[in-house]
Each structure stands twice: as structure tokens, then as C-alpha cells.
Amino acid sequence: MLEGVRSPTVTFCLRNTSLSKIPASFFSSMGSIQNFSLNVRDNEDLTSISKAFNAEKPGEEPFMINLKLGETKWNCDCSLG
């Protein structure tokens, strides 16, 4: 889904939906993205995001630099990556 993005830094907002999970396939082809921010606030049914990133520090591809979770029923199991 994101493979055509050419910017190295992206903020993706997915707010007020009925999604319960964001599958790993969403993050499978990140194109030129190196730094990724995800805003999933106000998704009351969202409980998890599949492990999306393996980088442990910026500069490795890709790296999640920001995650906003307000108003979600988050299941925190440390598997986000």
C-alpha cells in the first residue's frame, strides 16, 4: 500500500474507524520511507497492530518515530517492534 511513497518521512493518520487490527501486510512494502509516524487515535475497536518494524534505532529501514494511541483499547504485549 505504501510502496509508491517517495518521501523518507511519512505521517499516516487512521482515525475514527471500526478496524480492530492493522495487519502486517499494511507495512510490507514501505518504498522510500525511513521514518514513519502512525496516528490511530479515536479507534475504539483497535486493540493491536501487527509487528511492523524491526529497526531498533533511526537510520535503519524503516523506523517508527511516533505512535499516537489515544482513545483506543490497546492490547500492549510488546510485539509491535
Image (cartoon, rainbow, N blue to C red):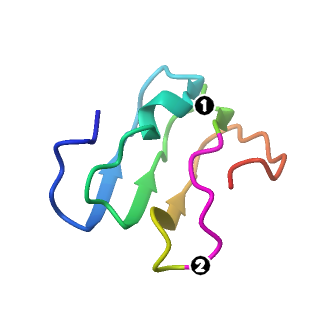
Q: Please name the residue shown 58% across and 31% down the image.
A: 44
Vertical relation: 81 (above or below) 72: below
Q: Is residue 59 left or right of 9 when viewed as pictured? A: right
Vertical relation: 29 (above or below) 65: above
Marks 2 and 1 sit apart, C-alpha to C-alpha, by 26 Å
The amino acid at mark 2 is Lys
Q: Please name the residue shown 51% across and 22% down the image.
A: 19
Which quadrant holds residue 51?
top right
Secondary element type, mark 1: loop
Chief secondary structure of the magenta portion: loop
The residue that disc 2 covers is: 57
Mark sitting earlier along the chain (2/1)? 1
Q: Which of the image's four quarters has the N terminus?
A: top left
Magenta span covers which residues? 51-57
Q: Which of the image's four quarters has the C terminus?
A: bottom right
Q: Which mark, residue 46? A: 1
